[in-house]
Image (tube, rainbow, N blue to C red):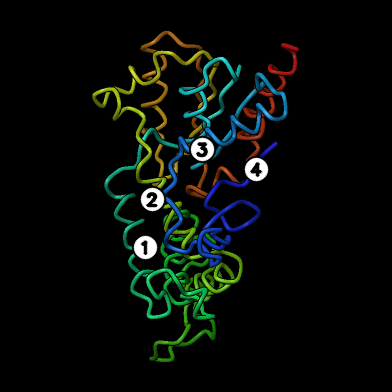
């Protein structure tokens, strides 16, 4: 099962929801949410559903961070933890990318300090730019070169600033379509949740100490071309688990798709995942 994160804009309570105290959308008044908050809400739902233990909690990217938080905060509530294309915390470079994306939104004249709902508008340009920047970081240079190269849409130079290269057309399409189904305030909240995630910070920046009490068996998967959450970040998690003599398997998948690889049907990736899930099923 899965559920939408609090603060989202699709089915969960978030900035677009009505604040009962004001009868207006929460907007920028919606509280900052952390990965731990999301996991706590998921655990409360499990209690309501009468689920005392999960066979596995699985997540990729930000979802992988949530899976790791599950293993830390609720060690007896999951038998397996699958952390895919994730990291124990963001690098300064990743935080910088998120900040540039946020500034694109915050500086949009239509943002209205987050109260754009009351103005019947959307900070389209800012949200579009944020998505375009994000999308660049999800792909590797090899993936972009393979997909677009330096192809000119019309096969000739037009000496202008309109869309000329295929990659420009692709990024503008991604940005424009994103604006139609995502909320700017939610984007701000979720990038902050990414920035704040750092379970080792409560243990003098010692990741081994943060993972000392986990009880689940782990599968950690990374992808060679993922420079947003590089394999070295996954190996930090593996090293900390091994330091605690925890049961952990690690697979580094050769892939050209960058961070997006965890969403792709790469044969080696699928075999590793399916084989591990089969082991879980065999335990039953």
On screen, residue 207 versus residue 136, left or right, reads left
Q: Are marks 4 and 3 in contact (CB under 8 Å)?
A: no
On screen, residue 44 versus residue 31, left or right, reads right
> To which residue does mark 4 refer?
3
> To which residue does mark 3 refer?
254
Crowding at mark 1 (Cα within 10 Å: few <14, some 14-19, many 20+): many
Instruction: Tell me how far mark 1 sits from mark 4, CA to CA.
Output: 25 Å
Q: Are marks 2 and 1 in contact (CB under 8 Å)?
A: yes
Q: Earlier in the sequence, mark 3 or mark 1?
A: 1
Residue 51: quadrant of the picture:
top right
**Disc 1 secondary structure class:** helix
**Disc 3 secondary structure class:** loop
Residue 193 percent across, percent down from the top left = 41, 46
Q: Are marks 4 and 2 in contact (CB under 8 Å)?
A: no
Q: Indicate the quadrant containing the N terminus: top left, top right, bottom left or bottom right.
A: top right
Residue 137 percent across, percent down from the top left = 42, 55
Q: Earlier in the sequence, mark 4 or mark 2?
A: 4
Residue 192, compared with residue 135, is above or below; it is above
> To which residue does mark 1 refer?
102
Q: Indicate the quadrant containing the C terminus: top left, top right, bottom left or bottom right.
A: top right
Instruction: Tell me how far mark 3 sits from mark 2, CA to CA.
Output: 30 Å
Residue 7 percent across, percent down from the top left = 52, 52
Residue 162: quadrant of the picture:
bottom left
Work out whether residue 166 or residue 46 is closer to the camera in this orientation and state it: 46
Q: Which mark is residue 192?
A: 2
């Amino acid at each position: 099962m899965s559920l939408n994160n609090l603060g989202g804009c699709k089915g969960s309570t978030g900035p677009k929801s009505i604040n009962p105290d004001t009868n207006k959308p929460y907007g920028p008044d919606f509280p900052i949410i952390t990965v731990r908050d999301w996991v706590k809400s998921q655990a409360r739902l499990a209690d309501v559903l009468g689920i005392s233990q999960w066979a596995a909690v699985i997540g990729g990217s930000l979802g992988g961070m949530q899976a790791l938080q599950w293993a830390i905060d609720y060690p007896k509530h999951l038998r397996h933890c699958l952390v895919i294309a994730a990291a124990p915390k963001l690098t300064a470079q990743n935080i910088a990318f998120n900040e540039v994306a946020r500034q694109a939104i915050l500086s949009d004249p239509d943002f209205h300090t987050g109260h754009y709902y009351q103005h019947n508008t959307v900070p389209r340009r800012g949200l579009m730019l944020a998505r375009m920047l994000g999308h660049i970081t999800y792909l590797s240079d090899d993936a972009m070169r393979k997909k677009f190269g330096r192809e000119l849409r019309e096969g000739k130079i037009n000496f202008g600033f309109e869309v000329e290269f295929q990659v420009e057309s692709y990024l503008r399409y991604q940005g424009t379509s994103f604006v139609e189904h995502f909320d700017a305030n939610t984007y701000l909240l979720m990038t902050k949740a990414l920035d704040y995630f750092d379970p080792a910070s409560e243990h003098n920046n010692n990741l081994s100490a943060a993972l000392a009490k986990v009880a689940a068996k782990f599968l950690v998967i990374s992808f060679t071309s993922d420079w947003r959450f590089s394999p070295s970040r996954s190996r930090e998690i593996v090293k900390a688990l091994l330091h605690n003599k925890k049961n952990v398997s690690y697979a580094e998948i050769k892939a050209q798709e960058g961070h997006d690889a965890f969403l792709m049907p790469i044969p080696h990736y699928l075999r590793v995942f399916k084989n591990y899930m089969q082991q879980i099923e065999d335990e039953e």
